[in-house]
Image: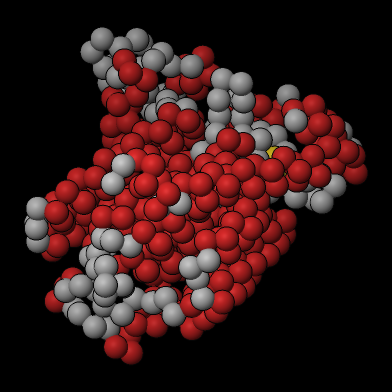
């Protein structure tokens, strides 16, 4: 099979069409976001410096809803279930982005979306492929599928804390799922996966930082992260539960390692500390990396390359018939290692500071130099690195770099000092609150 035939079989044209449709929707909605009140303001737990449109999730959903019916390989019930679950999560997500819903309402909507997927589209986890000695799940199938779906949704939501990060990780996961589907002889699932990946890539053009785009022009919001989590779960379950094209479920863990790892470890740590897993905090993996000197784009690229590498290795191990229990044990060992490391903040910062000092990442930005200079407990110097290549943040510095705002749930979210400094110079904060949307509209017009 030549490259042209392969591209046609896996539906690259549909993926490109989804990317174009998503980009066009974002292009239309971006200047309208202030008028529609679809803005994320830098207040409370928000970690950015400027009012930013939260249209990414809506744009991706519209792009996929326009393109997926063109593939003509889905039952009507499946498409209706997809549209219903998508609209539910996007609607609740947009409402949450504007009014900050309590966590249990979000989880309830996620449970309902999972049930729509199970009973409307017939997608569920019925067999674990011998993991932990378990085969057919029987009556446990439905609650397990709901639990796994809600877990994936919240894992992606939790990692959506830096420009380009969640989108890059999901895009990498979807591409690897498409490759696994092609290898397993399931090209129709590969087409679906690539269509979603195309929409995500178009969103990343507005969400990642580039030399010509110093900050994100739009966010996916809770609407986008919840929807992507549902779609990843949907594709994973379809891939691993197809008796004609079986793929062991263990592989899925290595295709989305960072969100799953971060969510599991963070949940265990916060519960042990007597905190809610849904409380805000600066203890995600991307926060540690940024506090050690990585920029948002660097953190996104490093973690995405890590995901691609681990997915490739896990796939090759399965091809070599390495026992699935050993591959699963490797993932559990990775989780335990990250838990042991991240329990001690200073040690975690030292680890990432050593990585940041590698020549491939270039010199430390001036803003990171200033932040490092405020640290009271410097990290060990890295041989060959400049005097600002490593550093850490003491508790006092953390307090100075943190602006806390107590939300409805009683959580005390944090904001990086560098973002607070940027907000101090932001004209939006100098205008009367009644004029805030007008100012945001003007800023968006100038940036469009």
Residue found 37% across the figure and 69% down from its top: 238
The reply to whether residue 392 is in sight is: yes
Residue farthest toward the bottom in the current orientation of the protein: 139
Query: Which residue is at the front of the view, 59 or 401?
Result: 59
Occupied quadrant, residue 429:
top right
Residue found 85% across the figure and 47% down from its top: 35
Query: Which residue is at the front of the view, 50 or 225?
Result: 225
In this picture, residue 70 sits left or right of residue 181: right
Occupied quadrant, residue 414:
top right
Residue 256 rendering spot, x and y as whole percentages: 35, 52
The reply to whether residue 105 is in sight is: no
Residue 438 rendering spot, x and y as whole percentages: 88, 38
Q: Quadrant of the C terminus?
A: top right
Query: Which residue is at the front of the view, 147 or 305?
Result: 305
Residue 311 rendering spot, x and y as whole percentages: 27, 48
Residue found 33% across the figure and 18% down from its top: 360
> Quick check: 287 above or below 280?
above
Q: How is the image coloured?
A: secondary structure
In this picture, residue 379 sits left or right of residue 325: right
> Quick check: 295 above or below 241?
above
Residue 332 rendering spot, x and y as whole percentages: 21, 57
């Amino acid at each position: 099979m030549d490259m042209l035939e392969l591209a046609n079989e896996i539906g690259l044209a549909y993926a490109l069409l989804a990317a174009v449709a998503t980009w066009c929707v974002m292009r239309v909605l971006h200047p309208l976001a202030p008028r529609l009140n679809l803005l994320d303001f830098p207040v409370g737990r928000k970690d950015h410096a400027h009012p930013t449109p939260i249209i990414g999730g809506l744009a991706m959903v519209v792009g996929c809803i326009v393109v997926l019916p063109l593939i003509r390989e889905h039952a009507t019930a499946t498409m209706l279930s997809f549209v219903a679950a998508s609209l539910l999560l996007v609607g609740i997500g947009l409402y949450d982005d504007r009014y900050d819903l309590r966590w249990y309402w979000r989880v309830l909507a996620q449970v309902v979306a999972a049930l729509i997927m199970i009973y409307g589209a017939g997608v569920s986890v019925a067999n674990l492929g011998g993991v932990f000695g378990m085969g057919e799940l029987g009556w446990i199938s439905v609650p397990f599928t709901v639990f796994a779906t809600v877990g994936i949704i919240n894992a992606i939501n939790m990692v959506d804390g830096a420009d380009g990060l969640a989108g890059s990780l999901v895009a990498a996961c979807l591409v690897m799922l498409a490759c696994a589907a092609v290898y397993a002889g399931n090209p129709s699932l590969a087409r679906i996966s690539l269509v979603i990946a195309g929409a995500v890539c178009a969103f990343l053009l507005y969400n990642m930082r580039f030399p010509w785009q110093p900050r994100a022009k739009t966010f996916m919001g809770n609407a986008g992260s919840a929807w992507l989590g549902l779609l990843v779960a949907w594709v994973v379950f379809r891939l691993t539960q197809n008796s004609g094209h079986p793929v062991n479920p263990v592989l899925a863990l290595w295709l989305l390692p960072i969100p799953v790892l971060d969510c599991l470890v963070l949940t265990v740590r916060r519960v042990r500390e007597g905190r809610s897993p849904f409380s805000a905090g600066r203890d995600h993996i991307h926060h540690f990396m940024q506090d050690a000197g990585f920029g948002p784009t660097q953190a996104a690229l490093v973690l995405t390359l890590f995901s691609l590498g681990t997915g490739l290795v896990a796939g090759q191990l399965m091809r070599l018939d390495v026992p699935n229990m050993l591959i699963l044990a490797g993932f559990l060992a990775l989780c335990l290692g990250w838990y042991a490391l991240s329990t001690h903040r200073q040690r975690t910062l030292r680890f990432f500071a050593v990585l940041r000092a590698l020549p491939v990442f270039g010199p430390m930005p001036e803003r990171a130099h200033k932040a490092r200079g405020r640290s009271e407990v410097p990290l060990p110097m890295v041989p060959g690195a400049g005097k600002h290549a490593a550093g850490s943040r003491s508790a006092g510095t953390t307090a100075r770099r943190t602006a806390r705002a107590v939300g409805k749930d009683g959580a005390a979210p944090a904001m990086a000092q560098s973002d607070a400094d940027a907000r101090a110079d932001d004209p939006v904060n100098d205008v009367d609150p009644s004029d805030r949307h007008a100012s945001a509209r003007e800023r968006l017009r100038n940036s469009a």
